[in-house]
Amino acid sequence: MLRKENILLVDDDIDILELLQRHLQSMDYHTYKAVSVKEALYILKDAHIDLLITDIQMPEVDGLELLKFAEEHYPEMPKLVITGYPSVSGALEVIKAGATDYLTKPFTKEELRKAVLKAFEQSSQRKYSKNKSNNPLAGLNAEMVGESDAFGKVTDIIERVKDNKATVLIKGESGTGKEMVARAIHYSGKFSRAPFIAVNCGAIPENLQEAEFFGYIKGAFTGANENREGFFQAAQGGTLFLDEIGTASLAVQSKLLRALQEKEVTKVGARKTEKVDIRVIAATNVNLLEEIKNKGFREDLYYRLTVVEIDVPPLRERMADIPILVEKFVKKYGIEYKDRLLRITPEVFDILKRYPWPGNVRELENVIQRAIIMGDGTIEVKDLPDKLKFQIDFPDTHLVSLDEMVKDYVQKVLIHTKGNKTKAADILQIDRKTLRDKLK
Ligand SMILES: Nc1ncnc2c1ncn2[C@@H]1O[C@H](COP(=O)(O)OP(=O)(O)OP(=O)(O)O)[C@@H](O)[C@H]1O
Ligand SMILES: [Mg+2]
Protein backbone atom coordinates (compact mmCIF):
# COMPACT_ATOMS: atom_id res chain seq x y z
CA MET A 1 0.00 0.00 0.00
CA LEU A 2 1.21 3.51 -0.74
CA ARG A 3 1.77 6.02 2.02
CA LYS A 4 -0.87 8.58 2.71
CA GLU A 5 0.93 11.67 1.47
CA ASN A 6 0.25 13.31 -1.87
CA ILE A 7 3.08 15.49 -3.15
CA LEU A 8 2.67 18.09 -5.88
CA LEU A 9 5.81 18.70 -7.95
CA VAL A 10 6.13 21.90 -9.95
CA ASP A 11 8.98 22.55 -12.34
CA ASP A 12 9.21 23.62 -15.95
CA ASP A 13 12.16 21.27 -16.40
CA ILE A 14 10.69 17.91 -17.28
CA ASP A 15 13.87 16.01 -16.42
CA ILE A 16 13.80 17.37 -12.88
CA LEU A 17 10.11 16.51 -12.59
CA GLU A 18 10.75 12.95 -13.68
CA LEU A 19 13.70 12.61 -11.34
CA LEU A 20 11.69 13.90 -8.38
CA GLN A 21 8.85 11.60 -9.27
CA ARG A 22 11.11 8.56 -9.49
CA HIS A 23 12.76 9.29 -6.17
CA LEU A 24 9.53 10.06 -4.33
CA GLN A 25 7.67 7.11 -5.77
CA SER A 26 10.46 4.82 -4.68
CA MET A 27 9.84 6.22 -1.18
CA ASP A 28 6.16 5.29 -1.67
CA TYR A 29 4.78 8.80 -1.93
CA HIS A 30 2.07 9.56 -4.43
CA THR A 31 2.95 12.39 -6.81
CA TYR A 32 1.19 14.88 -9.03
CA LYS A 33 3.29 16.72 -11.63
CA ALA A 34 2.80 20.21 -13.03
CA VAL A 35 4.98 21.94 -15.62
CA SER A 36 3.70 25.42 -14.83
CA VAL A 37 2.23 27.43 -11.97
CA LYS A 38 -1.08 27.53 -13.81
CA GLU A 39 -1.26 23.72 -13.93
CA ALA A 40 -0.27 23.58 -10.28
CA LEU A 41 -3.14 25.87 -9.30
CA TYR A 42 -5.66 23.55 -10.97
CA ILE A 43 -4.29 20.57 -9.11
CA LEU A 44 -4.17 22.41 -5.78
CA LYS A 45 -7.78 23.36 -6.19
CA ASP A 46 -8.96 19.83 -6.89
CA ALA A 47 -6.68 17.42 -5.10
CA HIS A 48 -5.75 17.05 -1.47
CA ILE A 49 -2.07 17.90 -1.48
CA ASP A 50 0.07 17.26 1.59
CA LEU A 51 3.32 18.78 0.37
CA LEU A 52 4.23 21.21 -2.38
CA ILE A 53 7.66 21.02 -3.98
CA THR A 54 8.30 23.82 -6.42
CA ASP A 55 10.99 25.35 -8.54
CA ILE A 56 11.35 29.13 -8.38
CA GLN A 57 12.51 30.23 -11.80
CA MET A 58 9.83 29.37 -14.31
CA PRO A 59 8.62 31.18 -17.42
CA GLU A 60 5.30 33.05 -17.20
CA VAL A 61 4.40 32.94 -13.52
CA ASP A 62 7.31 32.09 -11.23
CA GLY A 63 7.43 29.88 -8.18
CA LEU A 64 7.46 32.74 -5.69
CA GLU A 65 3.96 33.69 -6.77
CA LEU A 66 2.85 30.10 -6.31
CA LEU A 67 4.39 30.04 -2.84
CA LYS A 68 2.61 33.21 -1.81
CA PHE A 69 -0.68 31.94 -3.16
CA ALA A 70 -0.27 28.60 -1.42
CA GLU A 71 0.72 30.28 1.83
CA GLU A 72 -2.43 32.33 1.74
CA HIS A 73 -4.82 29.55 0.78
CA TYR A 74 -3.15 26.49 2.28
CA PRO A 75 -1.17 27.77 5.26
CA GLU A 76 -0.98 24.30 6.82
CA MET A 77 0.58 22.68 3.76
CA PRO A 78 4.37 22.41 3.98
CA LYS A 79 6.19 23.92 1.02
CA LEU A 80 9.58 22.91 -0.18
CA VAL A 81 11.47 25.02 -2.67
CA ILE A 82 14.04 23.80 -5.14
CA THR A 83 16.38 26.47 -6.34
CA GLY A 84 19.32 26.65 -8.65
CA TYR A 85 20.83 29.65 -6.89
CA PRO A 86 21.65 29.25 -3.23
CA SER A 87 22.22 32.92 -2.56
CA VAL A 88 21.41 34.15 0.91
CA SER A 89 19.00 36.82 -0.21
CA GLY A 90 17.19 34.39 -2.50
CA ALA A 91 16.84 31.91 0.32
CA LEU A 92 15.49 34.56 2.63
CA GLU A 93 12.96 35.57 0.08
CA VAL A 94 11.53 32.09 -0.34
CA ILE A 95 11.32 31.54 3.39
CA LYS A 96 9.51 34.83 3.76
CA ALA A 97 7.11 33.82 1.04
CA GLY A 98 6.16 30.79 3.08
CA ALA A 99 8.59 28.02 2.15
CA THR A 100 9.22 25.53 4.92
CA ASP A 101 12.66 24.80 3.56
CA TYR A 102 14.68 24.85 0.39
CA LEU A 103 16.87 22.41 -1.46
CA THR A 104 19.56 23.49 -3.92
CA LYS A 105 20.17 21.78 -7.25
CA PRO A 106 21.77 19.38 -7.79
CA PHE A 107 20.56 17.29 -4.87
CA THR A 108 20.88 13.61 -4.00
CA LYS A 109 18.01 11.27 -3.29
CA GLU A 110 19.07 11.17 0.35
CA GLU A 111 18.98 14.97 0.62
CA LEU A 112 15.54 14.94 -0.92
CA ARG A 113 14.32 12.29 1.49
CA LYS A 114 15.55 14.26 4.50
CA ALA A 115 14.08 17.51 3.26
CA VAL A 116 10.70 15.87 2.67
CA LEU A 117 10.63 14.21 6.07
CA LYS A 118 11.62 17.45 7.74
CA ALA A 119 8.95 19.37 5.86
CA PHE A 120 6.32 16.93 7.07
CA GLU A 121 7.61 17.01 10.62
CA GLN A 122 7.56 20.76 10.78
CA SER A 123 4.00 21.04 9.71
CA SER A 124 0.86 20.22 11.53
CA GLN A 125 -0.56 19.00 8.27
CA ARG A 126 -0.63 15.41 9.42
CA LYS A 127 -3.59 15.81 11.63
CA TYR A 128 -5.55 16.70 8.54
CA SER A 129 -4.74 13.47 6.76
CA LYS A 130 -8.02 11.84 6.22
CA ASN A 131 -8.57 8.48 7.79
CA LYS A 132 -9.20 6.27 4.86
CA SER A 133 -11.58 3.40 5.25
CA ASN A 134 -9.90 0.05 5.69
CA ASN A 135 -11.46 -1.33 2.58
CA PRO A 136 -9.79 0.25 -0.43
CA LEU A 137 -12.63 -0.96 -2.62
CA ALA A 138 -15.35 0.73 -0.62
CA GLY A 139 -17.24 3.02 -2.91
CA LEU A 140 -15.49 1.73 -5.99
CA ASN A 141 -17.31 0.22 -8.89
CA ALA A 142 -18.29 -3.05 -7.23
CA GLU A 143 -17.48 -4.87 -10.44
CA MET A 144 -13.74 -4.55 -10.15
CA VAL A 145 -12.12 -7.22 -8.02
CA GLY A 146 -8.61 -8.15 -6.95
CA GLU A 147 -6.64 -9.15 -3.88
CA SER A 148 -3.01 -8.74 -4.86
CA ASP A 149 -0.78 -5.98 -3.55
CA ALA A 150 -0.36 -4.72 -7.10
CA PHE A 151 -4.13 -4.42 -7.44
CA GLY A 152 -4.24 -2.65 -4.09
CA LYS A 153 -1.87 -0.03 -5.41
CA VAL A 154 -4.11 0.59 -8.37
CA THR A 155 -7.24 1.00 -6.25
CA ASP A 156 -5.31 3.22 -3.88
CA ILE A 157 -4.50 5.64 -6.70
CA ILE A 158 -8.11 5.50 -7.90
CA GLU A 159 -9.19 6.57 -4.42
CA ARG A 160 -6.86 9.54 -4.53
CA VAL A 161 -7.79 10.86 -7.93
CA LYS A 162 -11.49 10.12 -8.11
CA ASP A 163 -12.60 13.46 -6.69
CA ASN A 164 -10.26 15.73 -8.59
CA LYS A 165 -9.75 16.60 -12.20
CA ALA A 166 -6.07 15.84 -12.59
CA THR A 167 -5.30 14.24 -15.94
CA VAL A 168 -4.57 10.53 -15.66
CA LEU A 169 -2.68 8.23 -18.01
CA ILE A 170 -3.44 4.52 -17.60
CA LYS A 171 -0.81 2.18 -18.98
CA GLY A 172 -1.04 -1.56 -19.34
CA GLU A 173 -1.11 -4.51 -21.69
CA SER A 174 -4.23 -5.39 -23.59
CA GLY A 175 -6.95 -6.89 -21.41
CA THR A 176 -5.51 -5.81 -18.05
CA GLY A 177 -8.53 -3.68 -17.13
CA LYS A 178 -7.55 -0.16 -18.18
CA GLU A 179 -11.03 0.86 -19.18
CA MET A 180 -12.40 -0.56 -15.96
CA VAL A 181 -9.97 1.59 -14.00
CA ALA A 182 -11.08 4.68 -15.93
CA ARG A 183 -14.72 3.92 -15.22
CA ALA A 184 -14.00 3.24 -11.57
CA ILE A 185 -12.34 6.66 -11.25
CA HIS A 186 -15.32 8.37 -12.78
CA TYR A 187 -18.16 6.45 -11.18
CA SER A 188 -16.73 6.34 -7.67
CA GLY A 189 -15.89 10.05 -7.61
CA LYS A 190 -17.87 13.14 -6.96
CA PHE A 191 -18.42 13.92 -10.65
CA SER A 192 -20.09 10.58 -11.28
CA ARG A 193 -23.39 12.17 -12.21
CA ALA A 194 -21.75 14.06 -15.05
CA PRO A 195 -21.12 12.22 -18.33
CA PHE A 196 -18.41 9.62 -18.87
CA ILE A 197 -17.53 9.69 -22.56
CA ALA A 198 -15.28 6.89 -23.81
CA VAL A 199 -13.59 7.40 -27.15
CA ASN A 200 -11.49 4.81 -28.90
CA CYS A 201 -9.05 7.03 -30.78
CA GLY A 202 -7.99 4.09 -32.97
CA ALA A 203 -11.51 3.60 -34.26
CA ILE A 204 -11.92 7.09 -35.74
CA PRO A 205 -10.42 7.70 -39.20
CA GLU A 206 -7.69 10.33 -39.02
CA ASN A 207 -9.49 12.82 -41.24
CA LEU A 208 -12.57 12.79 -39.00
CA GLN A 209 -10.77 12.96 -35.66
CA GLU A 210 -10.72 16.73 -35.25
CA ALA A 211 -14.40 17.11 -36.03
CA GLU A 212 -15.36 14.23 -33.75
CA PHE A 213 -13.29 15.47 -30.84
CA PHE A 214 -13.98 19.17 -30.96
CA GLY A 215 -17.20 19.46 -32.95
CA TYR A 216 -17.76 21.59 -36.05
CA ILE A 217 -19.91 24.41 -37.29
CA LYS A 218 -22.22 24.40 -40.26
CA GLY A 219 -20.30 24.84 -43.50
CA ALA A 220 -16.90 24.07 -42.01
CA PHE A 221 -16.37 21.38 -44.66
CA THR A 222 -18.41 19.55 -47.27
CA GLY A 223 -21.07 17.57 -45.51
CA ALA A 224 -21.12 19.75 -42.40
CA ASN A 225 -24.79 20.64 -42.74
CA GLU A 226 -25.32 21.68 -39.16
CA ASN A 227 -23.46 22.66 -36.04
CA ARG A 228 -22.30 19.67 -34.05
CA GLU A 229 -20.83 19.12 -30.63
CA GLY A 230 -17.68 17.04 -30.22
CA PHE A 231 -16.66 14.62 -27.48
CA PHE A 232 -15.18 17.47 -25.47
CA GLN A 233 -18.46 19.35 -25.30
CA ALA A 234 -20.35 16.12 -24.63
CA ALA A 235 -18.20 15.32 -21.62
CA GLN A 236 -18.70 18.77 -20.06
CA GLY A 237 -18.48 18.55 -16.27
CA GLY A 238 -17.45 14.91 -16.39
CA THR A 239 -14.78 12.61 -17.79
CA LEU A 240 -13.45 12.17 -21.30
CA PHE A 241 -11.77 8.78 -21.65
CA LEU A 242 -9.33 8.70 -24.57
CA ASP A 243 -8.60 5.06 -25.19
CA GLU A 244 -5.59 4.10 -27.34
CA ILE A 245 -4.32 7.66 -27.17
CA GLY A 246 -1.23 6.58 -29.11
CA THR A 247 -3.33 6.45 -32.28
CA ALA A 248 -4.55 10.06 -32.12
CA SER A 249 -3.46 12.02 -35.21
CA LEU A 250 -0.78 14.68 -34.79
CA ALA A 251 -3.38 17.34 -35.60
CA VAL A 252 -5.61 16.12 -32.79
CA GLN A 253 -2.63 15.85 -30.49
CA SER A 254 -1.77 19.51 -30.87
CA LYS A 255 -5.39 20.54 -30.27
CA LEU A 256 -5.56 18.20 -27.33
CA LEU A 257 -2.51 19.81 -25.85
CA ARG A 258 -4.14 23.19 -26.19
CA ALA A 259 -7.36 21.93 -24.65
CA LEU A 260 -5.47 20.59 -21.66
CA GLN A 261 -3.37 23.72 -21.27
CA GLU A 262 -6.00 26.36 -21.79
CA LYS A 263 -9.09 24.39 -20.75
CA GLU A 264 -10.76 25.54 -23.93
CA VAL A 265 -11.49 24.12 -27.38
CA THR A 266 -12.42 25.46 -30.80
CA LYS A 267 -14.92 23.74 -33.08
CA VAL A 268 -13.67 23.05 -36.61
CA GLY A 269 -14.48 26.11 -38.68
CA ALA A 270 -15.25 28.28 -35.66
CA ARG A 271 -13.44 31.40 -34.55
CA LYS A 272 -14.70 31.45 -30.99
CA THR A 273 -13.20 29.22 -28.32
CA GLU A 274 -15.33 27.51 -25.69
CA LYS A 275 -14.40 26.78 -22.09
CA VAL A 276 -14.42 23.13 -21.17
CA ASP A 277 -14.41 21.78 -17.66
CA ILE A 278 -13.58 18.11 -17.89
CA ARG A 279 -11.25 15.49 -16.56
CA VAL A 280 -9.26 13.68 -19.22
CA ILE A 281 -8.24 10.09 -18.65
CA ALA A 282 -6.14 8.53 -21.40
CA ALA A 283 -5.11 4.92 -21.83
CA THR A 284 -2.46 3.19 -23.88
CA ASN A 285 -1.09 -0.29 -24.38
CA VAL A 286 1.86 0.93 -26.42
CA ASN A 287 4.96 2.54 -25.03
CA LEU A 288 4.41 6.23 -25.73
CA LEU A 289 8.03 7.07 -25.01
CA GLU A 290 8.94 4.90 -28.00
CA GLU A 291 6.31 6.71 -30.08
CA ILE A 292 7.85 10.01 -29.03
CA LYS A 293 11.21 8.83 -30.32
CA ASN A 294 9.60 7.86 -33.63
CA LYS A 295 7.94 11.28 -33.82
CA GLY A 296 4.48 9.70 -33.70
CA PHE A 297 3.57 11.25 -30.37
CA ARG A 298 4.15 14.74 -29.01
CA GLU A 299 6.39 14.86 -26.00
CA ASP A 300 4.74 17.97 -24.55
CA LEU A 301 1.35 16.24 -24.71
CA TYR A 302 2.78 13.21 -22.99
CA TYR A 303 3.80 15.31 -20.01
CA ARG A 304 0.40 16.98 -19.86
CA LEU A 305 -1.28 13.60 -19.81
CA THR A 306 0.90 12.09 -17.11
CA VAL A 307 0.00 14.32 -14.18
CA VAL A 308 -0.97 11.02 -12.59
CA GLU A 309 0.13 7.68 -14.03
CA ILE A 310 -1.46 4.34 -13.30
CA ASP A 311 0.30 1.17 -14.34
CA VAL A 312 -2.08 -1.74 -14.51
CA PRO A 313 0.21 -4.76 -14.22
CA PRO A 314 -0.27 -7.83 -16.41
CA LEU A 315 -2.18 -10.66 -14.74
CA ARG A 316 0.94 -12.88 -14.64
CA GLU A 317 2.49 -10.35 -12.26
CA ARG A 318 -0.46 -10.51 -9.87
CA MET A 319 -1.47 -14.15 -9.87
CA ALA A 320 -2.99 -13.62 -6.42
CA ASP A 321 -5.94 -11.97 -8.18
CA ILE A 322 -6.85 -15.10 -10.10
CA PRO A 323 -9.01 -16.91 -7.51
CA ILE A 324 -11.30 -13.96 -6.90
CA LEU A 325 -11.54 -13.18 -10.63
CA VAL A 326 -12.41 -16.83 -11.35
CA GLU A 327 -15.06 -16.75 -8.66
CA LYS A 328 -16.53 -13.59 -10.10
CA PHE A 329 -16.68 -14.83 -13.69
CA VAL A 330 -17.97 -18.31 -12.78
CA LYS A 331 -20.77 -16.69 -10.84
CA LYS A 332 -21.55 -14.14 -13.53
CA TYR A 333 -21.65 -16.52 -16.49
CA GLY A 334 -23.17 -19.40 -14.53
CA ILE A 335 -26.16 -17.26 -13.74
CA GLU A 336 -26.26 -15.76 -17.20
CA TYR A 337 -26.10 -19.00 -19.19
CA LYS A 338 -27.12 -21.81 -16.86
CA ASP A 339 -29.30 -19.98 -14.38
CA ARG A 340 -27.34 -21.23 -11.39
CA LEU A 341 -24.04 -21.16 -9.55
CA LEU A 342 -21.59 -23.61 -11.09
CA ARG A 343 -18.61 -25.38 -9.60
CA ILE A 344 -15.19 -25.91 -11.09
CA THR A 345 -13.06 -28.95 -10.39
CA PRO A 346 -9.82 -28.52 -8.39
CA GLU A 347 -7.85 -29.59 -11.51
CA VAL A 348 -9.35 -26.76 -13.52
CA PHE A 349 -8.70 -24.29 -10.75
CA ASP A 350 -5.11 -25.47 -10.57
CA ILE A 351 -4.60 -24.93 -14.30
CA LEU A 352 -6.20 -21.48 -14.20
CA LYS A 353 -3.95 -20.46 -11.32
CA ARG A 354 -0.81 -21.46 -13.21
CA TYR A 355 -1.41 -20.36 -16.78
CA PRO A 356 0.51 -17.15 -17.63
CA TRP A 357 -2.47 -15.42 -19.30
CA PRO A 358 -0.88 -13.47 -22.15
CA GLY A 359 -4.32 -11.96 -22.87
CA ASN A 360 -4.71 -10.98 -19.22
CA VAL A 361 -8.06 -10.65 -17.44
CA ARG A 362 -9.99 -10.55 -20.69
CA GLU A 363 -8.55 -13.94 -21.70
CA LEU A 364 -9.38 -15.43 -18.32
CA GLU A 365 -12.92 -14.13 -18.59
CA ASN A 366 -13.31 -15.54 -22.12
CA VAL A 367 -11.99 -18.95 -21.11
CA ILE A 368 -14.51 -19.23 -18.29
CA GLN A 369 -17.35 -17.91 -20.40
CA ARG A 370 -16.58 -20.43 -23.15
CA ALA A 371 -16.25 -23.31 -20.68
CA ILE A 372 -19.63 -22.53 -19.20
CA ILE A 373 -21.34 -22.26 -22.58
CA MET A 374 -19.75 -25.46 -23.92
CA GLY A 375 -19.89 -27.57 -20.77
CA ASP A 376 -22.78 -29.12 -18.97
CA GLY A 377 -22.72 -28.09 -15.33
CA THR A 378 -19.49 -28.41 -13.40
CA ILE A 379 -16.50 -26.99 -15.29
CA GLU A 380 -14.01 -29.73 -16.07
CA VAL A 381 -10.60 -29.89 -17.71
CA LYS A 382 -12.20 -31.02 -20.99
CA ASP A 383 -14.02 -27.68 -21.16
CA LEU A 384 -10.76 -25.74 -21.34
CA PRO A 385 -9.03 -24.72 -24.58
CA ASP A 386 -6.19 -27.00 -25.68
CA LYS A 387 -3.48 -24.48 -25.01
CA LEU A 388 -4.40 -24.53 -21.34
CA LYS A 389 -4.92 -28.28 -21.11
CA PHE A 390 -1.59 -29.08 -22.65
CA GLN A 391 0.50 -26.23 -21.48
CA ILE A 392 4.03 -27.46 -20.98
CA ASP A 393 5.01 -26.35 -17.55
CA PHE A 394 8.39 -26.47 -15.98
CA PRO A 395 7.93 -27.62 -12.42
CA ASP A 396 10.68 -25.94 -10.47
CA THR A 397 10.98 -28.69 -7.92
CA HIS A 398 11.40 -31.52 -10.38
CA LEU A 399 13.42 -30.57 -13.44
CA VAL A 400 13.64 -33.21 -16.14
CA SER A 401 15.77 -33.86 -19.21
CA LEU A 402 14.66 -32.78 -22.66
CA ASP A 403 14.07 -36.44 -23.63
CA GLU A 404 11.85 -37.01 -20.63
CA MET A 405 9.93 -33.85 -21.35
CA VAL A 406 9.42 -34.82 -24.97
CA LYS A 407 8.14 -38.22 -23.89
CA ASP A 408 5.82 -36.63 -21.37
CA TYR A 409 4.44 -34.26 -23.97
CA VAL A 410 3.96 -37.03 -26.51
CA GLN A 411 1.94 -38.89 -23.87
CA LYS A 412 -0.23 -35.84 -23.31
CA VAL A 413 -0.94 -35.52 -27.01
CA LEU A 414 -1.81 -39.22 -27.17
CA ILE A 415 -4.24 -38.84 -24.30
CA HIS A 416 -5.80 -35.98 -26.19
CA THR A 417 -6.16 -38.04 -29.39
CA LYS A 418 -7.50 -40.93 -27.33
CA GLY A 419 -4.57 -43.07 -28.40
CA ASN A 420 -4.91 -42.36 -32.11
CA LYS A 421 -1.28 -42.41 -33.28
CA THR A 422 -1.97 -40.99 -36.74
CA LYS A 423 -3.68 -37.96 -35.25
CA ALA A 424 -0.94 -37.59 -32.65
CA ALA A 425 1.80 -37.71 -35.29
CA ASP A 426 -0.16 -35.10 -37.20
CA ILE A 427 -0.32 -32.70 -34.24
CA LEU A 428 3.36 -33.26 -33.45
CA GLN A 429 4.26 -32.90 -37.14
CA ILE A 430 6.43 -36.02 -37.14
CA ASP A 431 5.92 -39.29 -38.98
CA ARG A 432 4.52 -42.40 -37.28
CA LYS A 433 7.89 -44.11 -37.19
CA THR A 434 9.47 -41.21 -35.28
CA LEU A 435 6.49 -41.27 -32.96
CA ARG A 436 7.01 -44.97 -32.29
CA ASP A 437 10.71 -44.32 -31.56
CA LYS A 438 9.83 -41.54 -29.13
CA LEU A 439 7.47 -43.87 -27.31
CA LYS A 440 10.12 -46.50 -26.71
N1 LIG B 1 -10.13 -6.26 -11.76
C1 LIG B 1 -11.08 -6.74 -12.56
N2 LIG B 1 -12.19 -7.27 -12.02
C2 LIG B 1 -13.16 -7.75 -12.81
N3 LIG B 1 -13.12 -7.75 -14.13
C3 LIG B 1 -12.06 -7.24 -14.74
C4 LIG B 1 -10.98 -6.70 -13.98
N4 LIG B 1 -10.05 -6.25 -14.83
C5 LIG B 1 -10.50 -6.50 -16.06
N5 LIG B 1 -11.73 -7.08 -16.02
C6 LIG B 1 -12.51 -7.52 -17.19
O1 LIG B 1 -11.61 -7.86 -18.22
C7 LIG B 1 -12.04 -7.36 -19.47
C8 LIG B 1 -10.98 -6.44 -20.02
O2 LIG B 1 -10.95 -5.23 -19.28
P1 LIG B 1 -10.76 -3.80 -19.98
O3 LIG B 1 -11.59 -3.72 -21.21
O4 LIG B 1 -10.95 -2.78 -18.95
O5 LIG B 1 -9.22 -3.96 -20.38
P2 LIG B 1 -8.28 -3.00 -21.24
O6 LIG B 1 -7.01 -2.92 -20.50
O7 LIG B 1 -9.01 -1.75 -21.56
O8 LIG B 1 -8.03 -3.86 -22.52
P3 LIG B 1 -7.66 -3.40 -24.03
O9 LIG B 1 -6.28 -2.85 -23.98
O10 LIG B 1 -7.74 -4.68 -24.78
O11 LIG B 1 -8.68 -2.38 -24.42
C9 LIG B 1 -13.35 -6.66 -19.24
O12 LIG B 1 -14.40 -7.54 -19.59
C10 LIG B 1 -13.38 -6.39 -17.76
O13 LIG B 1 -14.68 -6.45 -17.27
MG1 LIG C 1 -9.57 -0.97 -23.41
Image (cartoon, helix red, strand yellow):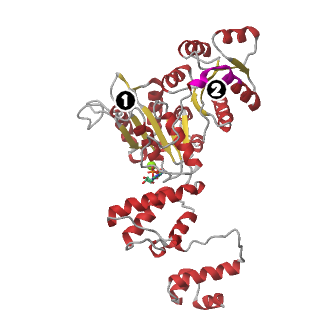
Magenta-highlighted residues: 118-127
- Image location of residue 11, percent across then percent down: 62, 24
Badge 2 density bin: few <14, some 14–19, many ≥20, Cα 10 Å: few
The quadrant of the picture occupied by the C terminus is bottom right
Quadrant of the rendered image containing residue 49 = top right
Magenta stretch: residue 121 in it?
A: yes
SS state under label 2: loop
SS state under label 1: loop
In the image: residue 408, left or right of residue 44: right
Residue 13: mark in rendering: 2
- Image location of residue 184, percent across then percent down: 44, 42
In the image: residue 374, left or right of residue 45: left
- Image location of residue 152, percent across then percent down: 55, 45
Magenta stretch: residue 390 in it?
A: no
Residue type of the residue flagged with mark 1: Gly
Q: Earlier in the sequence, mark 2 or mark 1?
A: 2
Return the residue nearer the eye: 23 or 132. Answer: 132
Magenta stretch secondary structure, dominant: helix
Residue type of the residue flagged with mark 2: Asp
Quadrant of the rendered image containing residue 223 = top left
- Image location of residue 52, percent across then percent down: 61, 23
Query: Mark 1 = which residue?
Result: 237
Return the residue nearer the eye: 139 or 163. Answer: 139
